[in-house]
Image (cartoon, helix red, strand yellow):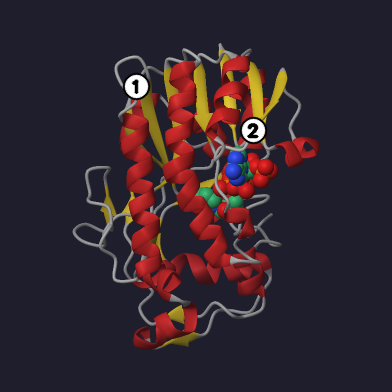
Amino acid sequence: MRVLVAGATGVVGHPLVGALRARGHQVSALVREESRAGAPEADAVVAADALDRQALLSAVSAARPEVVVHQMSALRLLRDDPAGAFALTARLRTEGTANLVAAARAAGARRLVAQSIAFAAAPAGDPVLDEEAPLYVDAPDPGWAATVRAVAELERLVLGGGPDLAGAVLRYGTLYGAGTAYARDGGTGQRVLAGKLPLPEGGSGIMSFLHVEDAAGAAVAAVESDATGVFHVTDDDPAPAAQWLPLYARALGGPPPRTVPAAMAPRLLGWFMAHQLTAARGAANDRARAALGWKPLRPSWRDGLGGE
Ligand SMILES: NC(=O)c1ccc[n+]([C@@H]2O[C@H](COP(=O)([O-])OP(=O)(O)OC[C@H]3O[C@@H](n4cnc5c(N)ncnc54)[C@H](OP(=O)(O)O)[C@@H]3O)[C@@H](O)[C@H]2O)c1
């Protein structure tokens, strides 16, 4: 198939281009002009900024894709400019996705596969949730509420592309592996190594992890499938912070996390990390397994988190 990968220089997009080509697909990599040097080896490279609608329409039309994959975010900027990274990522999820849907339709694509996140659910009900759980659009932290609303809009746009453009949303778990925040040299890895990620007492927030190679593998499965809708793409081992954080610190070779009173966690860790470690729910992957025929090659974070 002719497949266009938007976000082809990214932590998932880059290996995805190679994985799709290994399956025999003809892959166009969409990159921004200034990122051409970082483009993966592909059958074609087309350049556009997703926030420039006309440029995106031209670039996508030139590739004539049957399937378009959306792996764009600005989260790479997180370490240097967190507010800017979230604001730009929200624009990519809303405006950028609307532009990509229009470009995919104009180019005659029949399918759109997009990256979303599996940790945007409201923290209510079971410890591990399925895709029907409501999103946390009314989170008490305005920044996280804005992020979740942008995620909801991305999903609405991808699933509402009309009868000719089938949509599949892959809600990735917390990514780990080379190039991610949880890699040894990533933002979270460095924080843990420096002993600056304490464990709020109880540590009962549940995390569902996903290795980047499994994220790319699920995108390949979604490209080749006809299934539509929203899918949690996570490993098989959702775990509370009280389990994963000490094991992660040990795997990195860092100090064991010190315990802090839960009430102090938002001030010490920031609202989002405190939420993840104390209240977040995990995400069950049964639907992706059944409908996409996908399963993680790394079923548990215990066998690799902190190892890269
Ligand atoms: N589920 C998760 O845990 C999760 C999800 C997302 C991200 N993250 C974290 O965030 C970090 C980055 O991951 P990522 O894959 O989202 O991002 P990434 O590796 O930075 O890739 C994002 C892609 O989007 C492209 N892009 C950005 N702005 C664009 C624009 N205006 N127009 C067209 N393309 C644009 C980038 O291209 P350029 O090279 O041109 O900038 C890049 O190819 C990692 O540390 C990861 O751990 C985690």
Horizontally, residue 261 falls left or right of residue 23, namely left
Give the percent coordinates (x, y) of residue 46. 68, 25
Residue type at the position of mark 2: Ala
Q: Is residue 286 above or below residue 261?
A: above
Q: In this view of the protein, can residue 175 be seen by the observer?
A: no
The mark found on residue 48 in the picture is 2
In this rendering, the count of numbered labels is: 2
**The quarter of the displayed image where residue 200 is located:** bottom left
Q: Is residue 229 above or below residue 307?
A: above
Horizontally, residue 219 falls left or right of residue 232, namely right
Q: Residues within 10 Å of mark 1 (few under 14, many from 20)?
A: some
Among numbered discs 1 and 2, the one appearing first in the sequence: 2
Write down the residue under mark 1. Answer: 227
Identify the residue at image location x=53%, y=72%.
246
Query: For the residue labelled by badge 1, is the local secondary structure a helix, a strand or a loop?
Result: loop
Image quadrant occupied by the N terminus: top right
Give the percent coordinates (x, y) of residue 29. 66, 27
Identify the residue at image location x=66%, y=56%.
307
Q: In this view of the protein, can residue 108 be seen by the observer?
A: yes
Query: For the residue labelled by badge 2, is the local secondary structure a helix, a strand or a loop?
Result: loop
